[in-house]
């Protein structure tokens, strides 16, 4: 726990994203005897649905998980660094940005107000 | 399996919608292949006693068996066991996710200083507590994903479980929610 709540939120997301990515990378395939393994055993649904439709389900789940890690990692980085993605709306290079999406703490917000 | 094929059918439907507005043989051939795939999914479904439903209205995708749940229903089930939490988050955040001005406007504050004529300064601001509360659905759904990966794939998630707990406690503490999950662990 630090004095920067945004950084705490972002760091916890980043660590989770890294952990999830690692879990998927290390395992990739269903464990023996798991519901996914049993469903895919012998590919009972092969035919009009494809040559290996049960394996296709794994691919969907893996892609969804990777997508989740990407989203969380980006959200984590934005929160931790207090900066969003640079806006397309900005003045000339080297000058102050017109649109700033800096996240402000309560104290900073009150100071501005 | 059925749900995954329904996602296939939805993707095909969206692609067909795009192809409909295109000219050329390539688009025609691709649309024909999509229709063949829909027919094949229907035949496979019939073999396994699941019927393909072809909605009369063309703007709705075909589906196998009962109609797939909408995004709001899925998020509601993924976010929390408490019914309504996930769907409220979907209502709260979908406008933000899609960049709708009415969703973003609540983050805008007055700029601290005037600017040159012809320029506009916009600042976005949100307190840490509000941000954690507004975005709590993300960590909640992510923790549910881990629960399901453990169950369906039989993976050892013990290392990630520890990290998940830290994440949920951090978000819960800052959001002011005593314990935000994961809820599905027995």
Image: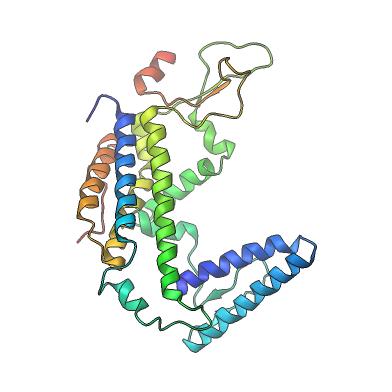
Quadrant of the snapshot with the C terminus of chain B: bottom left
Residue found 31% across the figure and 36% down from its top: A11
Residue found 51% across the figure and 66% down from its top: B7
Q: Camera-side residue: A31 or A83?
A: A31
Q: Camera-side residue: A24 or B175?
A: A24
Q: Camera-side residue: A43 or B48?
A: A43
Q: Is residue B118 visible?
A: yes
Q: Can you give x and y, in whole percent of width and height, for residue B134 in the image?
A: 39, 40
Residue found 27% across the figure and 68% down from its top: A31
Q: Is residue B177 visible?
A: no
Residue found 61% across the figure and 80% down from its top: B39
**On the picture, is B169 further left or further right than B82?**
left
**On the picture, is A88 further left or further right than B171?**
right
Q: Camera-side residue: B98 or A62?
A: A62
Taking B129 as reference, is A50 above or below it? below
Q: Which residue reaches farthest front?
A: A26
Q: On the image, which quarter does residue A5 sit in? A: top left
Q: On the image, which quarter does residue A105 sit in? A: top left
Taking B42 as reference, is A32 above or below it? above
* Number of numbered discs on residues: 0
Q: Can you give x and y, in whole percent of width and height, for residue A60 in the image?
A: 44, 63
Quadrant of the snapshot with the N terminus of chain B: bottom left
Q: Can you give x and y, in whole percent of width and height, for residue A98 in the image?
A: 58, 20
Taking B150 as reference, is A79 above or below it? above
**On the picture, is A101 further left or further right than A37?**
right
The way the protein has been coloured in the rendering is rainbow
């Amino acid at each position: 726990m630090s004095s920067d709540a945004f950084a705490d939120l972002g760091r916890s997301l980043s660590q989770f994203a890294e952990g999830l990515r690692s879990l998927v990378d290390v395992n990739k395939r269903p464990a023996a005897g798991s519901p996914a393994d049993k469903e895919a055993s012998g590919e009972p649904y092969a035919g009009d649905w494809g040559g290996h439709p049960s394996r296709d389900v794994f691919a969907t789940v893996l892609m969804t998980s990777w997508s989740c890690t990407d989203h969380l990692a980006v959200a984590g980085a934005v929160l931790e660094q207090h900066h969003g993605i640079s806006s397309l709306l900005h003045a000339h290079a080297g000058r102050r940005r017109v649109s700033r999406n800096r996240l402000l703490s309560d104290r900073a917000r009150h100071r501005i107000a | 399996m059925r749900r995954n094929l329904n996602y296939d059918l939805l993707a095909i439907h969206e692609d067909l919608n795009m192809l409909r507005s295109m000219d050329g043989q390539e688009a025609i051939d691709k649309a024909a292949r999509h229709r063949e795939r829909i027919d094949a999914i229907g035949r496979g479904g019939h073999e396994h006693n699941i019927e393909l439903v072809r909605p009369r209205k063309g703007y709705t995708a075909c589906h196998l068996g009962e109609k797939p749940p909408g995004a709001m229903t899925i998020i509601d089930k993924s976010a929390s066991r408490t019914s309504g939490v996930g769907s409220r988050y979907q209502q709260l955040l979908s406008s933000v996710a899609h960049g709708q001005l009415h969703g973003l406007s609540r983050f805008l504050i007055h700029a601290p200083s005037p600017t040159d004529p012809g320029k506009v300064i916009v600042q976005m601001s949100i307190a840490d507590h509000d941000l954690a509360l507004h975005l709590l659905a993300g960590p909640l759904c992510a923790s549910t994903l881990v629960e399901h990966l453990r169950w369906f794939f039989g993976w050892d998630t013990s290392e990630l479980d520890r990290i998940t707990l830290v994440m949920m406690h951090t978000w819960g503490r800052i959001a002011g929610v005593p314990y935000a999950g994961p809820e599905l662990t027995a």
